[in-house]
Amino acid sequence: MECQPRIVKISESPEKVEFDVMGIDVSVANGLRRIMIAEVPTMAIEMVVLEDNSSAIPDEMLCHRLGLIPILADPRKFKFPKDRHFTDPTEEDTIVFTLDVTCTLDSAKNPVNNKVYSSDLIWEPQGEQETTFADCPIKPVFDDILIAELQPHQHIKCKLFCCKGIGQDHAKFSPVCPATYRLMPKITIMKQSKKMSKEIKNCCPLNVFDIEDGELIVKNPRNCKMCRECIREERSEYVKLGREENHYLCLLFSVNIIK
């Protein structure tokens, strides 16, 4: 009788989700991982029109840094662009930001606006976007991403165009970073010894083992990273390491583009 595929959620937070997948082949597990990395659409900055950049950062590097800023916008409400030159942008396929920051000196000769952050990106709603996204205004996911540092009288001014894309086109569109899976460790206690039980428990850096009623037990098999400390030298007679077949531990770290 074939094992039915199952998914069990272990933990979830805004930054990461951990779950187990059982009863599938490794090719399917890897296919799921690759789909989450490269096939889930998001919104990202695709084109930067620079009007002025007197900072120390070259234009190409500044545009690259801007492009990697994650944008909080529901991609399901946008269409894929007809072209990436934005010759005819519409509210259905384009998000527009502006950036205009000048470093000045206050009365005490201290610099003002000497650091440009992602919070300085100003969203310019197109068409009915302000109404559509009234409950969740479009903005960078994080406000504290450092874009550039300016000296007094230096200036950055540009217009930024965002579009819908997938990670297969560019990593900036990927909603996860990273997405991993590994086989569930299979740890078998071969025989018991009071002396060796204590030694094996203490040698494990990830607290996989414990002692109950004087016997060694596997308490936290998920913690095992196969460092092999428990099977070195004479300890190999007491513990056997392996992998559970078709049982995958999946871990996804989100960049918070998609909630």
Image (cartoon, rainbow, N blue to C red):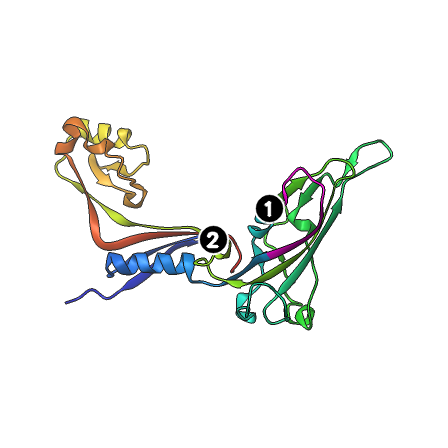
The quadrant where residue 240 appears: top left
Q: Which mark is residue 171?
A: 2
Q: Left of 209 or right of it: where is 62?
A: right
Residue at point 28% right, 61% down? Answer: 28
Q: Say whether disc 2 or disc 1 marks the residue closer to the N-terminus.
A: 1
Quadrant including the N terminus? bottom left
Q: Residue furthest right?
A: 107
Q: Secondary structure at mark 2?
A: helix
Is residue 145 visible in the rendered image? The answer is no
Circle 2 packing at 10 Å, graded few (<14), some (14-19), many (20+), is some
Q: Left of 2 or right of it: where is 122?
A: right
Q: Left of 103 or right of it: where is 14?
A: left
Residue at point 67% right, 58% down? Answer: 97
Query: How much space separates mark 2 and mark 1, taking CA atoms?
Result: 17 Å
Amino acid carrying mark 2 in the image: Ala
Q: In x, y percent, where is residue 173?
A: 50, 57
Amino acid carrying mark 1 in the image: Glu
Q: How many marks?
A: 2
Q: Foreground mark, 2 or 1?
A: 1
Residue at point 17% right, 30% down? Answer: 235
Which residue occupies the foreground of this view, 120 or 226?
Answer: 120
Is residue 125 visible in the rendered image? The answer is yes
Specify start and end residues of the magenta stretch as a single range.
47-60
Is residue 98 part of the magenta span, yes or no? no
Q: In x, y percent, where is residue 203?
A: 27, 29
Q: Secondary structure at mark 1?
A: helix
Would you place residue 174 above or below residue 144 in this image? below
Is residue 49 part of the magenta span, yes or no? yes
Q: Which mark is residue 60?
A: 1
Q: In x, y percent, where is residue 161?
A: 63, 60
